Image (cartoon, rainbow, N blue to C red):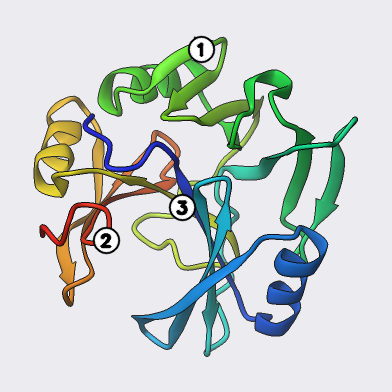
């Protein structure tokens, strides 16, 4: 996979705009970047996170009741910490600030609950071409995907705009080539290639439990090339 950025991003959805912004900016201390409209009455509030982006997607309309995704936590490396600090955002999403380098976390780690660890191992190493750096640990750039636990994860079909952590984003040079390559290596589509104005070309694939992964070709990272 040809990365345009060495950091994964993560997105969540919420109806609690002010509470979420206060939490992530004040309690966690993430710098605010900007707000963008992504359609369907959703505003995306982007925050810097060790090179990664946290996307707080605020929905104007009530979010549908939906089984949680398999993303069960987020770890953020922080200089100067002597021990991990566990927090939860206003919707109960788990986030932990960890000493930089602890358990190999240089930027962020995204924690998963999975139905079948072996299926995930095949997916992350073969379909996504992430590097296995330990049992249930996969590196993309300086970010980690970590199988934190095995347990029931309900498939949610094609629906993904529900409360909580819902997707990760990998930034690439060529969205079409990477999307088609992932499908050819056994990945499942979560949404065909689209273009959003002059900003981004993107598509979605799904991991074995139906969690969405955005394959993003962002003009600001590729020199305007879409």
Question: Which residue is depicted at the point 68% across and 80% down?
Answer: 16
From the image, state whether disc 1 or disc 2 is nearer to you: 2
From the image, state whether disc 3 or disc 2 is nearer to you: 2
9 or 203, nearer to the observer: 9
- Chain-order first, disc 1 or disc 2: 1
Please tell me in which quadrant of the rendered image residue 32 appears. Answer: bottom right
Image vertical order of residue 113 relative to residue 92, above or below: above
Please tell me in which quadrant of the rendered image residue 98 appears. Answer: top right
- Chain-order first, disc 3 or disc 2: 3
Residue 180: assigned label = none
Q: Secondary structure at mark 3?
A: strand
Image vertical order of residue 38 relative to residue 48, above or below: below
Q: Which residue is mark 3?
A: 167
From the image, state whether disc 1 or disc 3 is nearer to you: 1
Residue 187's x, y, as percent?
25, 33
Residue 220: assigned label = 2
Question: Which residue is depicted at the point 9% across and 40% down?
Answer: 177
Residue 133: assigned label = 1
Residue 179's x, y, as percent?
17, 42
Q: CA distance from mark 1 to mark 3?
A: 22 Å
Please tell me in which quadrant of the rendered image residue 97 appears. Answer: top right
- Chain-order first, disc 1 or disc 3: 1
On screen, residue 97 versus residue 112, left or right, reads: right
């Amino acid at each position: 996979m040809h990365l345009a950025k060495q950091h994964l991003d993560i997105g969540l959805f919420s109806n609690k705009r002010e509470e979420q912004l206060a939490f992530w900016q004040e309690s966690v201390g993430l710098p605010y970047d900007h707000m963008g409209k992504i359609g369907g009455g959703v505003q995306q509030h982007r925050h810097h996170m060790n090179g990664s982006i946290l996307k707080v997607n605020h929905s104007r309309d009530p979010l549908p009741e939906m089984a949680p995704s398999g993303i069960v936590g987020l770890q953020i490396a922080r200089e100067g910490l002597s021990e991990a600090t566990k927090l939860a955002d206003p919707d109960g999403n788990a986030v932990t600030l960890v000493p930089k380098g602890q358990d190999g976390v240089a930027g962020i780690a995204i924690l998963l609950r999975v139905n079948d660890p072996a299926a995930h191992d095949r997916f992350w190493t073969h379909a996504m071409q992430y590097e296995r750096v330990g049992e249930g640990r996969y590196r993309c750039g300086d970010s980690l995907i970590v199988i934190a636990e095995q347990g029931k994860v309900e498939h949610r079909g094609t629906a993904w705009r529900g409360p909580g952590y819902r997707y990760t984003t990998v930034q690439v040079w060529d969205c079409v080539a990477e999307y088609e390559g992932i499908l050819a290596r056994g990945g499942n589509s979560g949404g065909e290639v689209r273009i959003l104005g002059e900003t981004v070309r993107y598509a979605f694939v799904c991991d074995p439990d139906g969690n969405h992964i955005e394959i993003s070709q962002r003009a600001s990272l590729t020199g305007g090339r879409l």
